[in-house]
Image (cartoon, grey):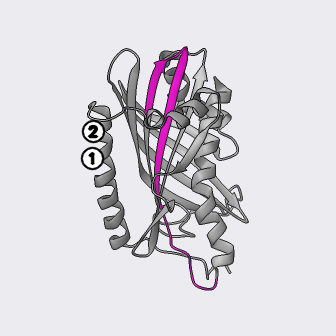
């Protein structure tokens, strides 16, 4: 089964993801420039009411939750949470404390550290655990930039720069597979965050766009629940973990 579910990242798959990201970032640029609502939360009164009352709201950006591309799938989810009684500065202090993310975002983040920090730019390392019927451990690196808009508003962008699957994690013969090899549960992860302090707290949104393998013939029963469920579950755990930490 292990050999049957292996996947390899292809250039055409990456190209399709990059094209999708270009369209996504053009829309985000309109949001942060003031040409449209800064928060996705505010685009729907019903959504804003649910978030304001303490519910974490998450849904696919498109109606399907995934976009087929050559030899892969793009998953695009957005979520929002309101954290009362905190300031933007307090939220950012916690969020940017990457050395402690392994404590805050268990069980998905099992190791974390800051590799480089210069002003509003960070490079970080995360070891991620993806578990749902199958268990996969990934060594990942991310490039993150924060962009203040005013005293109470800020957005950020996080790009994965390296994702490598780990074979036999935690064992004496642990080894890292070549980038793009393995199960293909996560090949790219780009996250776009928006923060706004108002109404006695902070609204926090995250749009997570990820790239995975497609569903293999004959192994859909094993792979499909992992590929289709984990993007939403990961986003929800991240938002809830942040709220609990604050």
**Residue at the spot x=51%, y=27% of the render?**
203
* Magenta span dominant secondary structure: strand
Residue 50 vs residue 1, the one in the foreground: 50
| Image quadrant assignment for residue 228 | bottom right
Residue 110 sits above or below residue 97 on the image: below
Q: Which residues are magenta?
A: 194-218
Residue 140 sits above or below residue 79 on the image: below
Residue 231 vs residue 116, the one in the foreground: 231
On the image, the x and y values in percent for residue 4 come to 61, 82
**Is 73 placed left or right of 215 in the picture?**
left
Q: Using the numbered discs, state the Cα–Cα distance from disc 2 to disc 1 in whole angstroms.
A: 7 Å
Residue 141 sits above or below residue 225 on the image: above
- How packed is label 2: few (under 14 Cα within 10 Å), some, or many (20 or more)? few
User: Pointer 2: what residue?
Assistant: 30
Q: Which mark is residue 26?
A: 1
**Residue at the spot x=52%, y=16% of the render?**
199
């Amino acid at each position: 089964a292990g050999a049957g579910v292996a996947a390899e990242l292809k250039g055409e798959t990456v190209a399709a993801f990059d094209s999708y990201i270009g369209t996504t970032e053009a829309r985000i640029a309109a949001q942060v420039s003031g040409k449209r609502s800064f928060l996705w939360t505010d685009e729907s009164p019903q959504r804003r009411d649910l978030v304001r009352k303490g519910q974490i709201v998450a849904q696919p950006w498109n109606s399907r939750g995934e976009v087929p591309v050559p030899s892969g799938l793009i998953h695009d989810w957005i979520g929002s949470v309101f954290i009362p009684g905190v300031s933007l500065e307090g939220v950012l202090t916690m969020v940017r404390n990457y050395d402690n993310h392994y404590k805050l975002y268990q069980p998905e983040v099992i190791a974390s550290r800051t590799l480089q920090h210069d002003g509003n730019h960070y490079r970080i390392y995360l070891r991620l655990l993806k578990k749902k019927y199958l268990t996969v451990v990934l060594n990942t690196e991310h490039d993150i930039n924060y962009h203040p808009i005013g005293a109470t508003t800020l957005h950020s962008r996080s790009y994965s720069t390296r994702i490598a699957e780990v074979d036999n994690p935690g064992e004496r013969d642990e080894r890292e597979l070549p980038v793009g090899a393995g199960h293909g549960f996560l090949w790219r992860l780009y996250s776009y965050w928006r923060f706004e302090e108002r109404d006695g707290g902070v609204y926090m949104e995250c749009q997570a766009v990820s790239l995975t393998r497609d569903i293999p013939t004959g192994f859909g029963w094993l792979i499909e629940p992992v590929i289709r469920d984990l993007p939403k579950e990961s986003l929800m755990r991240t938002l809830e973990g942040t709220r609990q930490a604050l």
